[in-house]
Image (spheres, rainbow, N blue to C red):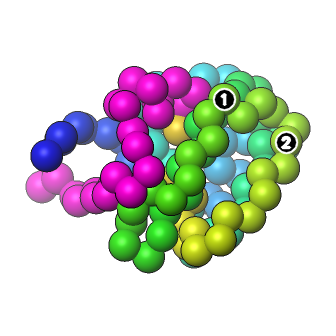
Amino acid sequence: MMQNTWNIHIADTFFKRLFGLMWKKNISITDVYIFPNCYRVHTFFMRMPIDILFLNKNNEIICMIEHVKPWRIVPKIKDAITIVEVKSGFIQEYNLQNLTCINWAKKY
């Protein structure tokens, strides 16, 4: 099993979800923004392209969209309940495939 260390940012409040990656100029390839119970995404007010992962209830990737440019609306993906936003190139960097299970755990 592949194990990586990522900087996890969970959008679990209204304002974290509202602002997400808006106005950020750049993020690290290890920055992972998780939006639980999220079904749609847009890239309004973003200043960089991003990769988007759609996860099902088992945290398995069911859809990936690479290099989504700013000012786009991404369609709803059936059965997706979590959306993950990452730096453009993340999917290639980590060689992700559909049905890859994404797990995150706190480091103590």
Instruction: Judge whether 17 appears above or below 64 on screen.
Output: below
Instruction: Judge whether 16 appears above or below 58 on screen.
Output: above
| Residue 93 on the magenta span | yes
* Residue name at image x 24 percent, y 38 percent: 5
Q: Which residue is mark 2?
A: 72
Q: Amino acid at mark 1?
A: His
* Residue name at image x 58 percent, y 74 percent: 79
- Percent x, y of residue 43: 78, 43
Badge 1 element:
strand
Q: Is residue 54 visible?
A: yes
- Percent x, y of residue 3: 18, 41
Q: Which mark is on residue 67?
A: 1
Relative placement, left or right, of 5 versus 39 is left
| Residue 100 on the magenta span | yes
Relative placement, left or right, of 4 versus 78 is left
Instruction: Judge whether 66 appears above or below 107 on screen.
Output: above
Badge 2 element:
loop
Q: Amino acid at mark 2?
A: Arg
